[in-house]
């Protein structure tokens, strides 16, 4: 209670009634795989052009870039990229010529050896400042030998080099004063898509900056021949902020859809495929706030052997599997390329969520960017696959290539449909995040009433959006939080127990029209 020590009028603010629960995002994807370049710690990406600037272009032995492109083409808006590299990969760093600046590529790999850094006088003319030009060549390492060249020849060579570079970054008027807003660490680290600078004890500028010199980073390597399960999974014992691969996504609550198309790349060690698929599904089952999209191996033409017991698949209510692969246009070869469909499907999930809501099954939707399917699926073949919970991607004349299935990898009839499982993920995560204010509040009838009111208001909005059954809220859900849901022992031990029941809508998977001849007269009823 407030303390009143002198006479007067006191105005106080109090909280009554419910607190609103805001629905969480359900359309943020997480991709695990190889990229041309970039950091290992996951980064948020909001467009394919942003992905290209940070992670580079297409790789012949990786599907990640194609999958991310398909995600954005199909309606995806946000994703996190967990770049993985092979064991033993090293980071390229600057040679001694740049001392005291210590520059390194933002991620491991031989790509870092194709970064060149040129140091010049600042454009402002201030002798205490300097300029940094960073360039990257995706194909060949430039010849930077300037021995015997005069300044004019160096300038011409430099301009020619920059014209052939894939990416050029300019950081001007950099200061060595650590208190300055233009300090080189503040203006480069976290902004550059190529390099990061390590803070040194010296605050001097490079001694021969006025010579306008350019050097290549070196020492970067791609590591072992094959990508393994351990590379994709990352080290669970790594310090917070230093985790990579699948393990890094445990720290990112926003991820709600998970894809790993590179387990089918030519560089992935096939012996770890089944184990890593199990890792992905276990990850989703443990966190309970995300859903996995699983691919099957290419060339799987024998549909009679394809089931949830076929390697690398297994049953799970937190995942869905799609068949077959799709063909897309490959900018590298200018021809069609066969890729796993998970990235495109993740985009369809996001598109459906944004346009209709998470309660709408992500099916009967066009796969944008797909030119062909690996195998044409007939109705008879889907009659075999659908009861096995294998979602088909089919080509329909005049309608295009469509997702024609909406089942999870679970044989439990309660969790048969993708939209039901993802709706409950949405409800559970939203209620959990929206009721954090309840913790440590006095556990009494007043609190129980506020909890009931908060959840009831939220579920009423969900029902009005069409996600729940019933013609009125009472038919769609119930919320109980009172003496019937908790004992005195629960209360004494600090437990508040709220019981919630909802009636989710199910997709019209089988649409049946019964037609008969009618001779007229009164309406026939059954």
Image (cartoon, grey):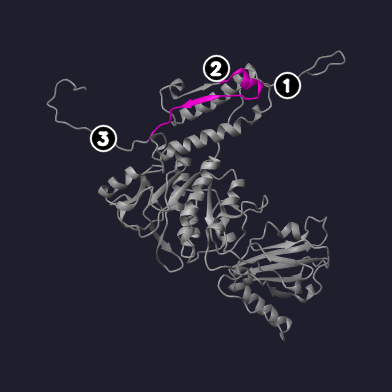
Q: Main secondary structure of the magenta part?
A: loop
Give the side of residue 490 with respect to residue 421, left or right: right
Q: Does the rendering let one see residue 319?
A: yes
Q: Quadrant of the N terminus?
A: top right
Q: Residue furthest right?
A: 6
Nearer to me, 272 or 441:
272
User: Tag 1, which secondary structure?
Assistant: loop
Magenta stretch containing residue 125, yes or no? no
Q: Give the residue drawn at x 19%, y 22%.
A: 523
Using a 10 Å C-alpha cutoff, classify the residue at mark 1 as few (fewer than 14 neighbours), some (14 to 19) or many (20 or more): few
| Residue 202 lies in quadrant | bottom right
Which region shows up in magenta? 481-506
> Which residue position holds label 1?
13
Q: Earlier in the sequence, mark 3 or mark 2?
A: 2
Magenta stretch containing residue 488, yes or no? yes
Q: Position of residue 127 (x, y in %)?
A: 83, 68
Q: Earlier in the sequence, mark 1 or mark 3?
A: 1
> Which residue position holds label 3?
512
> Which residue position holds label 2?
484
| Residue 165 lies in quadrant | bottom right
User: Tag 3, which secondary structure?
Assistant: loop
Nearer to me, 93 or 10:
93
Give the side of residue 200 with respect to residue 58, left or right: right
């Amino acid at each position: 209670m407030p303390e009143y020590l002198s006479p007067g009028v006191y105005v106080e603010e109090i909280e009554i009634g419910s607190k609103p629960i805001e629905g969480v995002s359900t359309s943020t994807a997480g991709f695990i795989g190889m990229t041309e370049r970039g950091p290992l710690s996951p980064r948020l990406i909001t467009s394919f052009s942003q992905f290209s600037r940070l992670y580079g272009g297409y790789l012949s032995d990786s599907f990640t870039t194609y999958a991310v492109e398909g995600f954005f083409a199909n309606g995806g808006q946000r994703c996190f990229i967990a770049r993985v590299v092979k064991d033993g990969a090293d980071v390229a760093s600057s040679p001694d010529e740049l001392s005291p600046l210590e520059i390194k590529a933002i991620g491991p790999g031989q790509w870092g050896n194709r970064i060149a850094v040129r140091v010049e006088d600042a454009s402002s003319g201030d002798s205490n400042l300097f300029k940094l030009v960073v360039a990257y060549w995706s194909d060949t390492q430039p010849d930077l030998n300037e021995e015997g060249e005069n300044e004019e020849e160096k300038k011409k060579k430099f301009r020619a080099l920059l014209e052939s570079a894939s990416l050029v970054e300019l950081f001007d008027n950099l200061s060595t004063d650590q208190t300055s807003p233009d300090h080189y660490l503040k203006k480069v680290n976290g902004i550059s898509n190529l390099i990061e600078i390590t803070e040194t004890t010296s605050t001097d500028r490079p001694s021969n900056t006025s010579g306008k010199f350019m050097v290549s980073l070196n020492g970067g390597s791609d590591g072992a021949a094959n990508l393994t399960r351990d590379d994709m999974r990352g080290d669970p014992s790594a310090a917070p902020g230093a985790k990579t691969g699948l393990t890094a996504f445990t720290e990112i609550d926003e991820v709600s859809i998970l894809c790993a198309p590179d387990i089918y790349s030519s560089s992935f060690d096939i012996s770890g495929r089944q184990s890593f698929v199990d890792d992905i599904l276990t990850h989703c089952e443990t966190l309970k706030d995300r859903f996995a999209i699983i691919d099957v191996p290419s060339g799987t033409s024998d549909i009679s052997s394809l089931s949830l017991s076929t390697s690398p698949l297994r049953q799970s209510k937190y995942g869905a599997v799609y068949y077959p692969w799709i063909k897309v246009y490959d900018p590298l070869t200018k021809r069609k390329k066969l890729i796993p469909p998970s990235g495109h499907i993740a985009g369809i999930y996001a598109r459906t969520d944004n346009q209709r809501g998470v309660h709408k099954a992500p099916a009967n939707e066009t796969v944008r960017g797909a030119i062909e399917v690996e195998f044409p699926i007939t109705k008879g073949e889907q009659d075999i696959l659908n009861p096995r919970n294998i979602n088909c991607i089919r080509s329909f004349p005049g309608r295009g290539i469509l997702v024609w299935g909406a089942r999870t990898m679970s044989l439990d009839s309660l969790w048969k449909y993708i939209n039901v499982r993802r709706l409950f993920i949405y409800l559970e995560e939203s209620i959990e995040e929206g009721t954090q204010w309840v913790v440590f509040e006095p556990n009494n009838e007043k609190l129980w009433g506020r909890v009931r009111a908060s959840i009831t208001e939220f579920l009423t909005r969900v029902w009005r959006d069409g996600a729940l059954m019933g013609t009125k809220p009472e038919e769609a859900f119930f919320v109980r939080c009172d003496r019937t849901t908790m004992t005195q022992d629960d209360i004494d031990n600090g437990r508040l127990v709220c019981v919630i029941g909802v009636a989710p809508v199910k997709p019209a998977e089988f649409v049946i029209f019964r037609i008969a001849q009618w001779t007229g007269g009164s309406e026939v009823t059954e």
